Image (tube, rainbow, N blue to C red):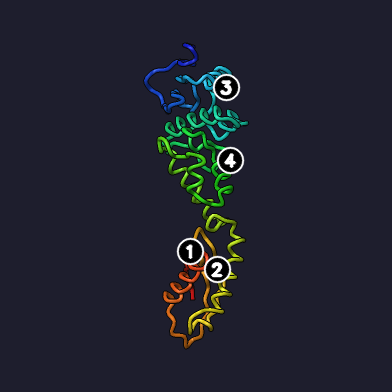
Amino acid sequence: MENKNQQYSYFGVMDDAHVSYTSEYLSLYLKIDANECIYSFKYESKNPAICNFFEYNQNFFIDAKIDNTFFSKAFHKVNNVTDQIVLFHFKSCIDSFLGKPSGLSPYIEGQIICFCAKVTSASLIDHYKKSYGDLKKVYLATNASSFCGQCSCRVERILKDEVAKGEFFLGEDKGTWTKKIEDLISDFAMFSPAGYEQLNFSISSLKTNIVKLKCSRPSDSNLKRREIQKTLENFFRSETNRDIKVSVVI
C-alpha cells in the first residue's frame, strides 16, 4: 500500500489491465479476476473524506465478489455525499467490466445525480414539489446540470417522470385549477357566442398548461372541433391572463 498525503493509494497489485472511472472528485482503478472478484484497486483523490473512506473500508473490497449483493453489502447505509461518490465510481467501473452502460439508475431515492452541485434525486423532486412544478425554479434553486452537463439526461428523466404524474398545473396544485376551469366552463356557457350554448364540456385532464376537454354537441351543429378549441382557449386566456392551451375531444 502506498499513501501520499491521502491523495494516492494502492491496494493489491496494479498493472495496465484494469477498468477505471475518473471524475473531479476521484479516480478509481479496479483489477477484476476471472471469478469476477476484485483482487486489487487503486484510487487517487484529494478529498480527505474519500481517502478516509477507503482507509477504513479497504479490507472489504479486496477479494469482494461482484454479484447482485455487492453494493447492498458495501453501501448498506448510503446517506452522505462521500458514500454516493464512491458508490458511483465503483458502479461505473464494474459496469465497464461487464460491458454495461455506465452510471446508476436515477430512481434510487437519495442518489446523487449531479455531483457538481451535489444534488440528489430526492432533493430534486422535493424542489419540484415546493415550486409546484415550475421547472425554471427547480433548476435555479438546485443548479442541477448547470456545470459539466454530464447529469443532464438523468435530471431531465426524473423531472419528466414527475411532470407525468400531473400533480401541478401552471405552477399550482392541480386541484385548485380543476375548480377554476370548471367555473370558467360555467361562465363560458353563460356568455358564449351563438351556437355554443348547446355544447357541454367536461374536464378530461390538466397537464402542465394544457386543458383537455371532452365536448358533446348536437348532431346538427356546424361548429368544428378546431373552431371550438380556439374559442375556448381565447376565453380562458382572457379570463385568467395565463398561457392556457386547450385541447378538445368530441
Name the residue furthest bottom.
220
Q: CA distance from mark 2 to mark 4?
A: 32 Å
Please, what is the three-letter code of the amino acid marked with disc 4?
Glu
Mark 2: which amino acid? Ser
Kindly identify which numbered label has been placed on residue 109.
4
Residue 14 relative to residue 175: left or right: left
Pinpoint residue 89: horizontal percent, then vertical percent: 47, 29
Residue under pointer 1: 244
On screen, residue 99 above or below 201: above
Q: Are marks 4 and 1 in contact (CB under 8 Å)?
A: no
Say what amino acid the circle numbered 1 marks. Ile
| Mark-to-mark CA distance, 3 and 2 | 55 Å
Label 1 SS? loop
Badge 4: residue crowd in 10 Å (few <14, some 14–19, many ≥20): few
Q: Earlier in the sequence, mark 3 or mark 2?
A: 3
User: Which quadrant of the figure has residue 177?
Assistant: bottom right
Q: On the image, numbered disc 3 is attached to which residue? A: 60
| Image coordinates for residue 144, horizontal then vertical, percent | 47, 39
- The residue where tag 2 is placed is 204
